[in-house]
Amino acid sequence: MESLFSIRDLRKYYPLGKKKREGRTEEVVLKALDGLSFDIFPGETLGVVGESGSGKSTLGRCILNLISPTGGSVLFRGKPIESLRSWEMKSLRQDMQMVFQNPSSSFNPKLTIGRTLRNVAYFYDMGRQEGRDRINRLLAYVNLDQTVLSRRSEELSGGQLQRLAILRALIPSPAFIMADEPVSALDVSVQAQILNLLDDMKKEFGLTMMFISHELTVVEHICDRILVMYLGTIIEMGDTEDLFSHTAHPYTRALIAAKPKMYPDEETERVVLEGEVPNALDIPQGCRFYSRCPQAVSGRCDKAPPPLREVSGGHWVACYLVQGAASSRGREVMTPVTEQPKAI
Ligand SMILES: Nc1ncnc2c1ncn2[C@@H]1O[C@H](COP(=O)(O)OP(=O)(O)OP(=O)(O)O)[C@@H](O)[C@H]1O
Ligand SMILES: [Mg+2]
């Protein structure tokens, strides 16, 4: 299947100035993303999970071209988005929308909700009546009353605002929605409603979605595939069912073990992570998970970063300890695009 997005060797480095070490002055660079390659296929929901600071939001922003990567490429339907001109980007923006974590800060408190939503419709060149009709139809879809249009964001609950944020994203009929922690700021009682709405919306409008969360329980139920990040790299990626039933990376196993049990007597593997989270400013030369890995092998795992390899159909893992399976059935990671394709 042709991908909607192709991400190849994506890097985002933040230079943070200089510091002295052992008498020498060194450039301090924070590697928020360090060589990610993967595809997002039409119609799928791809979950991106990882701890705070692992680079999830940075990845989302690079994909939507809200920030420029330091290296590598993001192709949308085969076109490199980082080299698009502003007018080309406007039409692409219509296809790619975002739902943020904190709905209350994503609405201008001075404007009524109706004004904010109509501004979005006008921005995408809809006529006055066309915009109003679309907003009214979508209001019914997200299960809100038309009276919200005359109110301001401070007068609405977090759940209502997140429904409106979803509505706003749907106004230009996008092909792709990036949802960055869309339920983590909400009360537990409304989280499930918003997740169900996102899931229904994806099916109803045939959308492709990237869903960022630090909680596996959240992505497990609505994502077709899951990508696990650790300190700016992918450490495991695969179909949701496969990732849970054939978990390969010790870090993913620890994340799964940490997820709350559905039933008190449910059997779960106990994996305790020891050691310190490495500093993103001083990335270890071997596996980034080495200092916390319960199975790390000294002299092997701490020498060079393990490559991301396909251990079974569509299941990719970066760990020397699963290399046995990889060497018989697996193949090397997708080759990064080193030459930048020409701008359209
Ligand atoms: N503008 C910036 N300048 C410098 N460093 C940045 C900048 N933006 C992000 N970072 C750093 O990049 C790393 C990744 O940040 P990012 O926000 O992508 O993480 P995240 O996985 O989304 O975390 P969270 O779960 O807390 O939202 C962090 O170490 C962060 O401090
Ligand atoms: Mg984030």
Image (cartoon, grey):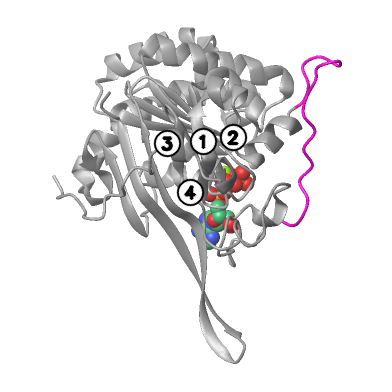
Say which quadrant the N terminus sits in: top left
Counting from the top left corner in percent of width and height, residue 226 is at: 52, 30
Kindly indicate whether the residue at mark 1 contacts the one at mark 3 (C-beta within 8 angstroms).
yes
Kindly indicate whether the residue at mark 1 contacts the one at mark 2 (C-beta within 8 angstroms).
yes
Asked if disc 4 is less than 8 Å from ligand 1, the answer is yes
Q: Residues within 10 Å of mark 1 (few under 14, many from 20)?
A: few
Q: Residues within 10 Å of mark 4 (few under 14, many from 20)?
A: some
What amino acid is found at the position of numbered circle 1 in the picture? Ala
Mark 2 vs 1, N-terminal side: 2
Query: What residue lies at 70% left-to-right and 49% top-to-bottom?
Result: 293
Q: Secondary structure at mark 2?
A: loop
Mark 3 vs 4, N-terminal side: 4
Distance from Cα at disc 4 to Cα at disc 1: 32 Å
- The majority secondary structure of the magenta stretch comes to loop
What amino acid is found at the position of numbered circle 4 in the picture? Thr
Counting from the top left corner in percent of width and height, residue 252 is at: 63, 36
